[in-house]
Image (spheres, coloured by chain):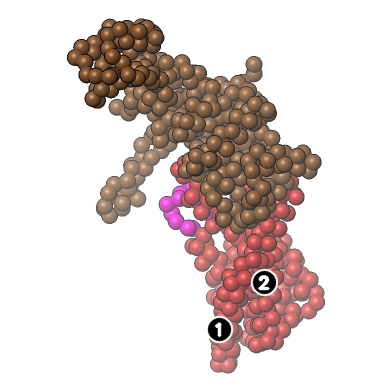
């Protein structure tokens, strides 16, 4: 299948002016600035197929937003090529952004002083959306994102959750084929997060919208993304289906056993005790070596077991593992 | 596309009309400024020194009232818009819309201009008329020439403002260059004191700069100090400056887009 987004060897170089402390330092750097070059994005390549929901994740300053800005044509890359729907955003920004919906969680494209609906009306004119199509689209968005209550409220009076829903609707009005979401759930309560996640799933299913999501909320990733791309220090460190990345990075699972009475010999082959608190014991085991039922069977023959549970490693563990191993040296 | 610009203008117009307090303060400040300037001129003319015979007191009064009125209408928010949007990183939300940024900012400023015409310029003229009589143009013909000249003036001012705005993309640390430019324009455009009162050397230099074509040209036409033939010549100079500044802006904008500097995020 033809890729929606094709990125090859993308590099973005920043020039940083080093500031020295104190008045003397400020004067000195004003007259003779010390410039150092730094690659915010350092040779990234990936391609995304239509209908995927991709989590683009990494620690702060990893180069996520820089990549998104280059994909939307806001920044020009130092080297490498980008194709969005077959068009280079640097060559023809306007053609590309027509096909994109963009939401930056920390910014709004809505007009602060005006009613929410008025911002939508402006977008209809900017994207030259046909009146009938606009009405229909808006009706659906209003329904799914529950915008009825605050359609006529000035944007400055909206709560963060309402504003975010407004922003997402604004990004979807022109029926884009790709949606970029930069931290769409930042600062939102559980209810608002839930609504937004549902909406993303919904539009991906019904309209086949390709979604690229950057977030620090790994629940977002776990619930939405089929694939994740992990970046750190301007480079891709992992790219693949979420399950296999978790498996690869954290092959361990945990078995938590609660005993009826204290026992001395807790050892068992294929598993190691990593923690003990009163009658509660944590075993770590590799799932390639032994399956959970096998381990439970072996343990129950030996120990008086009261309760038992298996803990799967989650995305968070995996990601922490990635950040740790690729941290700046 | 035009619909979008018109909508931006309309939204700005509506927003501005809701801020009533700001209107009162603006009218009050400008009225005080007008009164002070005119009184100053009256005193200067009482001395009867021959140096100020270029214009009559009535001409200077009209010139001053009109000049302050024009300054309320000639809104060039673009330099501040760009500066603040870049500072706060908000400019990205404008970049991912399929519409030229600068044209949107122009539409925004025109909205400001239309609202100022209604809620700042008209009240100011009315109050000033009560104090000093209605500032009539020299003739009907000079009024007719004054209008297009004003439009050309605004184009020059706006292009200058947009050019200064572009600087923000390159050097954010310089602070708001707009204020520096505004001070230069205020003096060299003849908006406070007509350049005819300046030494010849200043007047000669000023002929080759765009500034005097923003205020002095239309105002000179209005009070009849510039006759019809000269007015047409002046307007073609205005048009020439518009072309030059526009080319500068287009070139600068193309380069800026290649090297945008965006804060944070």
Q: Which circle, 2 or 1, is nearer the viewer?
A: 2
Identify the residue position indicated by label 2 in the image.
B119
Task: Report which quarter residue B199 is drawn in.
Answer: bottom right
The disc numbered 1 marks a residue on which chain? B
Residue A121 in percent (x, y) is at 71, 49
Q: B104 above or below B235?
A: above
Would you call the spot at circle 1 few (<14 residues within 10 Å), some (14-19), or many (20 or more)?
few
Q: B44 above or below A9?
A: below
Q: Residue at position x 62%, y 36% from top?
A: A101
SS label for mark 2: helix
**Of A79 and B30, the residue lying toward us:** B30
| Chain identifier of the red chain | B
Residue A253 in percent (x, y) is at 36, 17
Q: Image quadrant for the C terminus of chain A?
A: top left
Residue B1 in sight: yes
Q: Residue at position x 24%, y 19% from top?
A: A261
Identify the residue position indicated by label 1 in the image.
B36
**Going from the N terminus, do you reach mark 2 or mark 1 first?**
1
**Of B71 and B196, the residue lying toward us:** B71
The disc numbered 2 marks a residue on which chain? B
Q: Is residue B156 magenta?
A: no
Which portion, as a residue range, is magenta?
A: B164-177
Is the stretch drawn in magenta largely helix, strand or loop? helix
Task: Report which quarter residue A287 is drawn in.
Answer: top left
Residue B245 in sight: no
| Chain identifier of the brown chain | A
Task: Report which quarter residue A319 is drawn in.
Answer: top left
Would you call the spot at circle 2 few (<14 residues within 10 Å), some (14-19), or many (20 or more)?
many
Estimate the spatial distance between the alpha carbons at disc 2 and disc 1, rounded to whole Å.
21 Å
């Amino acid at each position: 299948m033809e890729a929606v987004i094709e990125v090859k060897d993308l590099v973005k170089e920043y020039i940083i002016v080093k500031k020295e402390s104190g008045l003397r330092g400020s004067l000195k750097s004003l007259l003779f600035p010390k410039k150092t070059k730094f690659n915010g994005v350092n040779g990234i390549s990936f391609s995304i197929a239509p209908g995927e929901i991709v989590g683009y994740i990494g620690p702060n300053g990893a180069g996520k937003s820089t990549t998104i800005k280059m994909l939307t044509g806001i920044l020009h890359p130092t080297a490498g090529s980008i194709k969005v729907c077959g068009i280079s955003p640097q060559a023809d920004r306007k053609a590309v952004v027509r096909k994109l919906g963009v939401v930056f969680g920390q910014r709004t494209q809505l007009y602060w002083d005006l009613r929410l609906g008025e911002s939508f009306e402006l977008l209809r004119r900017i994207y030259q959306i046909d009146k009938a199509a606009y009405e229909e689209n808006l009706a659906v968005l209003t329904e799914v994102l529950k915008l009825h209550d605050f359609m006529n409220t000035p944007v400055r009076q909206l709560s963060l959750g309402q504003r975010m829903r407004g922003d997402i609707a604004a990004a979807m009005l022109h029926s884009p084929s790709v949606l970029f979401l930069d931290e769409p759930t930042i600062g939102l309560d559980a209810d608002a997060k839930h609504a937004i996640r549902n909406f993303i799933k919904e539009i991906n299913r019904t309209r086949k919208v390709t979604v690229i999501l950057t977030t620090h909320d790994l629940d977002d990733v776990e619930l939405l993304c089929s694939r994740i791309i992990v970046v750190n220090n301007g480079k891709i460190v992992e790219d693949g289906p979420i399950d296999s990345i978790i498996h690869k990075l954290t092959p361990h699972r945990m078995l938590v056993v609660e005993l009826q009475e204290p026992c001395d010999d807790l050892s068992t082959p294929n598993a190691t005790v990593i923690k003990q608190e009163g009658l509660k014991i944590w075993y770590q085991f590799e799932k390639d070596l032994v399956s959970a039922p096998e381990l439970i069977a072996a343990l129950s023959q030996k120990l008086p077991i009261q309760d038992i549970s298996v803990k799967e490693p989650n995305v968070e563990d995996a990601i922490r593992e990635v950040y740790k191993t690729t941290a700046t040296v | 596309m035009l619909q979008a610009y018109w909508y931006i203008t309309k939204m700005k117009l509506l927003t501005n009309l809701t801020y009533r307090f700001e209107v009162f303060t603006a009218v009050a400040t400008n009225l005080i400024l007008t009164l002070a300037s005119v009184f100053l001129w009256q005193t200067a003319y009482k001395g009867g020194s021959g140096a100020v015979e270029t214009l009559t007191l009535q001409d200077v009064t009209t010139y001053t009232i009109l000049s302050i009125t024009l300054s309320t209408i000639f809104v060039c928010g673009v330099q501040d818009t760009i500066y603040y949007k870049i500072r706060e990183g908000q400019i990205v939300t404008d970049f991912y819309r399929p519409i030229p940024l600068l044209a949107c900012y122009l539409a925004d400023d025109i909205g400001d201009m239309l609202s100022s015409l209604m809620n700042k310029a008209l009240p100011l003229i009315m109050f000033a008329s009560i104090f000093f009589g209605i500032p009539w143009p020299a003739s009907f013909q000079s009024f007719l020439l004054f209008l297009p000249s004003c439009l050309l003036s605004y184009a020059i001012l706006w292009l200058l403002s947009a050019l200064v705005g572009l600087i923000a993309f390159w050097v954010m640390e310089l602070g708001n260059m707009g204020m520096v430019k505004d001070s230069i324009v205020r003096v060299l455009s003849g908006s406070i004191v007509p350049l005819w009162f300046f030494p010849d050397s200043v007047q000669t230099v000023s002929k080759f700069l765009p500034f005097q074509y923003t205020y002095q040209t239309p105002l000179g036409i209005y009070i009849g100090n510039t006759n019809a033939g000269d007015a047409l010549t002046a307007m073609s100079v205005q048009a020439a400056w518009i072309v030059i500044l526009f080319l500068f802006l287009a070139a600068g904008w193309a380069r800026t887009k290649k090297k945008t500097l965006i804060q944070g995020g």
